[in-house]
Amino acid sequence: GAGVSQTPSNKVTEKGKYVELRCDPISGHTALYWYRQSLGQGPEFLIYFQGTGAADDSGLPNDRFFAVRPEGSVSTLKIQRTERGDSAVYLCASSSAEGGTYNEQFFGPGTRLTVL
Amino acid sequence: LAKTTQPISMDSYEGQEVNITCSHNNIATNDYITWYQQFPSQGPRFIIQGYKTKVTNEVASLFIPADRKSSTLSLPRVSLSDTAVYYCLVGDPPTSGTYKYIFGTGTRLKVLA
């Protein structure tokens, strides 16, 4: 079946611009996560949705970052007034969170954001 | 969430068994240990998860001693395609509701021909 998809795969923008990154989770997965990964580092947690609500947004670095998931499926990560330090690969993951032994998170390929 | 420590890099040869050890001295009672694999330009992929003793699946084994302060991922007979970064994660995914994984820098495994 289809995995997690993210669009665009690459995004180049200028400092100060606004960007939106989209994530399509696996159908039926109620939990959705956003991570950010810089070169040579592991993914850094940003925000976690359970259904439509943000269950944990403690990883968002500042108020320029915002994410929504209005219908409990597709999610959009929004970054205002982008800065060069926002350049990274933004990863989305989803999981069923329906119990069971473990919460396996299925990751998408990521969106590479470059802020010039 | 417990902090994890793992070697930055490892080299191995095709056909060998590779063991990657992760330290998690502050692991909590409810924490599970999970390993992910990441290839370049891809998102991480789940390998294995365990709570104690030994867990084995079709790709790896996970050894966890009684004190659970460390764990070892064992990859049998590695091939060139196992070259990747391996992350050890500690968290309480099934019951806490936070589902927040903290990734470290991982171990870069390079398999040589």
Image (cartoon, coloured by chain):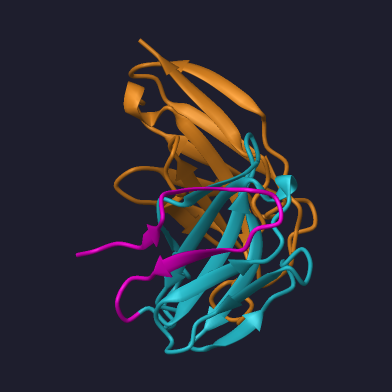
Chain colours: A cyan, B orange
Q: Position of residue B108 (x, y in %)?
A: 56, 29
The vertical placement of B77 against A60, above or below, is above
Q: Residue at x 48, y 62 (%)?
A: A92
- Please state if B85 lies on the left or on the right of A28 as rendered: right
Q: Nearer the viewer, residue A48 or B52?
A: A48
Q: Is residue B66 above or below residue B30?
A: above
What is the count of numbered marks? 0
> In which quadrant will I find the C terminus of chain B?
top left
Rendering coords of residue A18 (x, y %): 62, 63
Q: In the depicted view, which residue is nearer to us: A37 or B4?
A: A37
**Residue A24 belongs to magenta span:** yes
Residue visible at 69% across and 56% down? A82
Residue lying at 71% horizontally and 56% vertically, measured from the top left: A16
* Residue at 43% across, 37% down: B39
Q: Residue A80's spot in the image, x, y percent?
A: 68, 66
Q: Is residue A76 magenta?
A: no
User: Residue lying furthest left in this view?
Assistant: A1
> Which quadrant of the figure has residue A78?
bottom right
Please identify the quadrant where the N terminus of chain B is shown. Answer: bottom right
The image shows residue A43, relative to residue B75, as above or below, that is: below
Q: Quadrant of residue A95?
A: bottom left
Q: Residue furthest top?
A: B113
Relative to the observer, which residue lies in front, B40 or B20? B40
Q: Is residue B10 left or right of residue A116?
A: left
Q: Start and end of the magenta stretch?
A: A1-28
Residue B12 visible (yes or no): yes
Q: In this rendering, does residue B92 appear at all?
A: no
Nearer to us in this view, A10 or A43: A10
